[in-house]
Image (spheres, rainbow, N blue to C red):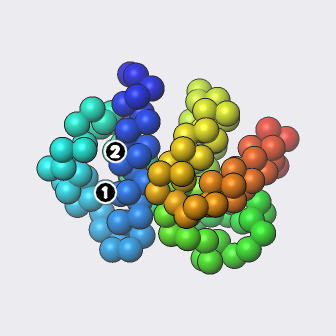
Amino acid sequence: MTSGSRHLARRSAVQALYQWELTGQSAAEIESGFISDNAYSGVNREYFLQLIENIPRYCDTLDDSLRPCLSRDLDTVDPVERSILRLAAYELIHESEIPHKVVMNEAIELCRLFGSEEGYRFVNGVLDRLSTRLQQGQ
């Protein structure tokens, strides 16, 4: 499994999670739309599916872990940035083999690609606080 394919899986997952939040579609419905898209080639399909199935499943728990790290209500966060935060929180909590620095760098890169102009700073701050809390066992 290459890091590039995981990067592409995260990139597609952010788009899929945004779609899920707006439409409420299932992972299977969302995946079928991505499979027909040329941008899906090169994506680690297994990891993409894991992300789009598990993040909605654990959404309430992920949101609960993010709330103490936020300076405002999670519902007021830009939907794209909220999807990126959930993806990163999932990886920080459930994918212990991925170093926190890698998770945070990927999230910042995704935010620069899809988020608002200064959104990456906000996301970085939230994830830094979450990473610290997790490392301290909170």
Q: Which mark is residue 27?
A: 1
Q: Quick one: 89 or 106, which is closer to the camera?
A: 106
Query: Considering the numbered disc 1 on the image, is that residue within a helix, a strand or a loop?
Result: helix
Quadrant in the rendering for residue 27: bottom left
- How packed mark 1 is, by other alpha carbons closer than 10 Å (few <14, some 14-19, many 20 or more), is some
One can see residue 94 in this view: no
**Could you tell me the amino acid type at mark 2?**
Leu
Q: Where in the figure is residue 116, as x and y percent of width and height?
A: 55, 64
Report x, y in % for residue 64: 67, 63
* Quarter location, residue 63: bottom right
Residue 94 on image: x %, y %: 58, 41
Give the secondary structure at mark 2.
Answer: helix
Name the residue at 35% across, 66% down. Answer: 19
Toward the viewer: 107 or 24? 107
Q: Position of residue 7 (x, y in %)?
A: 43, 36
Residue 64's disc number: none
The residue depicted at 59 percent of the width and 27 percent of the height is 97
The residue at which mark 2 appears reads as: 49
Lower sequence index among marks 1 and 2? 1
Callout 1–callout 2 Cβ contact below 8 Å:
yes
The residue lying at 81 percent from left, 47 percent from top is 133
- In space, the residues marked 1 and 2 are separated at their CA atoms by 7 Å
For disc 2, the neighbor class at 10 Å (few under 14, some 14 to 19, many from 20) is: some
| 64 lies above or below 120 | below
Asked if residue 33 lies left or right of residue 65, the reply is left
Q: Is residue 32 visible?
A: yes
